[in-house]
Image (cartoon, helix red, strand yellow):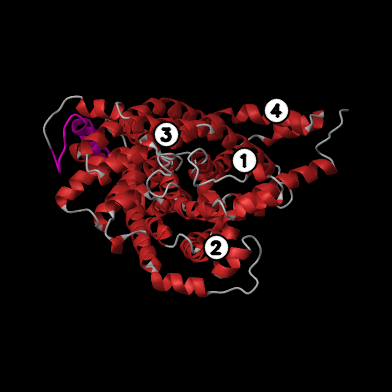
Amino acid sequence: MTTQSRLVPYLYIAPLLLLLAFVFGYPLVRIFEFSFKMVRGIDGPWIGLRNYQLVLGQDLFWESVLHNLQLLLAIPAMVVISLIVSVLLYERVAGWRLYRIIVFVPFVLAIPIIAVVMKRMFQFSGPVNEVLRWLSLDFLALDWIGSSDVALWTVMILIVWRESALGIILFLARLLSLDESMIEAAKIEGANWWQRLRYIILPQMRGVIEFFVVVSVITMLAAVFAYVFVMGGGRGGPGTATMVVELYIFNALIRTSLPGIASAASVLLFLVSVLLIFPLFRARRRVRKLEA
Amino acid sequence: MRKQPLSGLAGTALKQGVLLLAAFFALVPTLFMILTALKSDEEYAIDKLGFPDSPVIENFRAVLVDSPFLAWMANSVLLVIGAVLLSTIVSGLAAYAIACMEFKGRETLLALSTSLMAVPPVVMIVPLFVLYTQLGLISTYQGTILIYAGLITPFSVYLLTTFFRTVPKELFESARIDGAGPFLILIKIVLPLSLPAIVTLVVVNSLYVWNDLLIAIIFLQDDAKRTLVAGISVFQGRYNNQVPLTMAGMVIASAPMLILYIVFQKHFIRGLMAGAIK
């Protein structure tokens, strides 16, 4: 009876262990192995650090890394936009229910769909430039998609547009868990809107802002494939202007059939994400404690 | 007493202005897509911004005849249902054990599973692709469903464990005294109480699977098995110069999620807000 009941929990977690071992465990072991092999088809001979030398010696890889790093510049804009909108929604400005439904929309639509739409909007002869010229801002009417100097910035506009919706959702959830009596008390004390925001609301939002920033860093470094794939015509174009590490891995695996090279790049990306797990955990724990 | 510059009329107007602007930007791509889809190529060439003079639905017909949008949609639905169902069952069982039973390695398991949320999916694709090629699982639904289910499961376990821990222990005790086994307690007591958490899970996970491109494009390469999102990425290059036609396709592609969102907005908003911490 006791041995039986001691075994029961393991029956419940067995499917989880199997699933995680297959989808995470197996690949995480194999990328390390593959990264030291010259894989042709399903396996190949050990070649030491050759794959890493190849990847790290390739300009295209470093250009991709640089592009991922440039995307980090979008994060401050996302934080500011999300903060402003979420605070206004929290204040229940007239019509806030409708506004809330609308500003969540970017998060509901699939990224490739929006990328296709935005690509047409930002075409050189498209509606965005038409509006800019109409506003006499001709110098801003750039070749948003076709120019290799501008294309990555256009991708960033799309990323800010969508990821800010996540920020608003997160921040609003945190705001709704705030203790309203403190804000009321401050109102009675005569604190104005700015003072209430600066001294009462923002300090309590620190944890959730930190969480959003860490999540966004992970996104920018390792989860922008869907944005870039459509905007860059599947090839990180024009030229290599929107090439990112994920696309580099994709190309190595699918287009040039070099799983060894793709694995070496995957290992590097994995190590970076491991470094980010610790700040992520700390931030999440703090948010959960505050919201509980 | 201090003056309150932003609580007056000007302050209200400013706040409304900011929210109107945010709402406008959030909706602009959707509006552009719908308005353009109703224009003819000729009209779009002259007027890119305005409302269509004489709305045409020809574009929608052409897209539906030309491209297998409905088949792609059916594929996406199948993947969403398969992956979300599998993940919910697997993580429900495990979360119940983690939250309500004593066993060795319990906290380690939870920490390990939770930390997997931060591992980017792209890291896992190379070995799985090689393995699937070997096993003939490329372009199969079951193979792809398994990957999606795995990728969303760490979040499911995390969310359900957190929620199950809030179920009062007295409920278990009284059920156990009545002779109910652990599985019966899970089905009869824990699950019915956890409906809000499960709604969150279904919303967040369905959006992930429905919207994903990376896995879909790599593991479902057969044209007949494409998901909606992967199909679009193929489709958009084909009609590069026919913007209205492309937009009609995008309207059809975004319609299911938009309609679900509007109809079930309460569940979506609650689900998104509760599930944002992932």
In the rendered structure, which amino acid carries the disc numbered 1?
A: Leu
Q: Which of marks 4 and 1 is nearer the N terminus?
A: 1
Q: What stretch is highlighted in magenta?
A: A17-43
Between label 4 and label 3, give the one nearer the viewer: 3
Q: Residue at x 55, y 29 (%)?
A: A207
Q: In the rendered structure, find residue B109 and report the number of the disc placed on it.
A: none
The three-letter amino acid code for the residue at tag 3 is Leu
Q: Name the residue under label 1.
A: A176
Circles 3 and 1: CB atoms closer than 8 Å: no
Chain ID of residue with mark 3: A
**Of marks 4 and 3, which one's residue comes earlier in the chain?**
4
Q: What residue type is labelled 2?
A: Val
Number of residues whose C-alpha sits closer than 10 Å to that of mark 2, classed few (under 14), some (14–19) or many (20 or more): few
Say whether residue B253 is left or right of residue A23.
right
Residue A36, compared with residue B23, is above or below; it is above
Q: Which of marks 1 and 2 is in front?
A: 2
Q: Where is residue A202 in the image (x, y as percent from the top left)?
A: 65, 29
Q: How far apart are marks 1 and 2 (CA)?
A: 24 Å
Label 3 neighbour load within 10 Å: few <14, some 14-19, many 20+? many
Chain where mark 2 sits: B
Say which quarter of the image contains residue A236: top left
Sort mark 4 into few (<14), some (14-19) or many (20+) by Cα contacts within 10 Å: few
Q: Vertical placement of A222 versus A108: above or below?
A: above
Q: Are marks 3 and 2 on the same chain?
A: no
Determine the CA span between mark 4 and mark 3: 31 Å
Q: Which mark is residue A221?
A: 3
Residue B10 in percent (x, y) is at 83, 42
Q: Which of marks 3 and 1 is in front?
A: 3
Within 10 Å of disc 1 (Cα), the crowding (few <14, some 14-19, many 20+) is: few
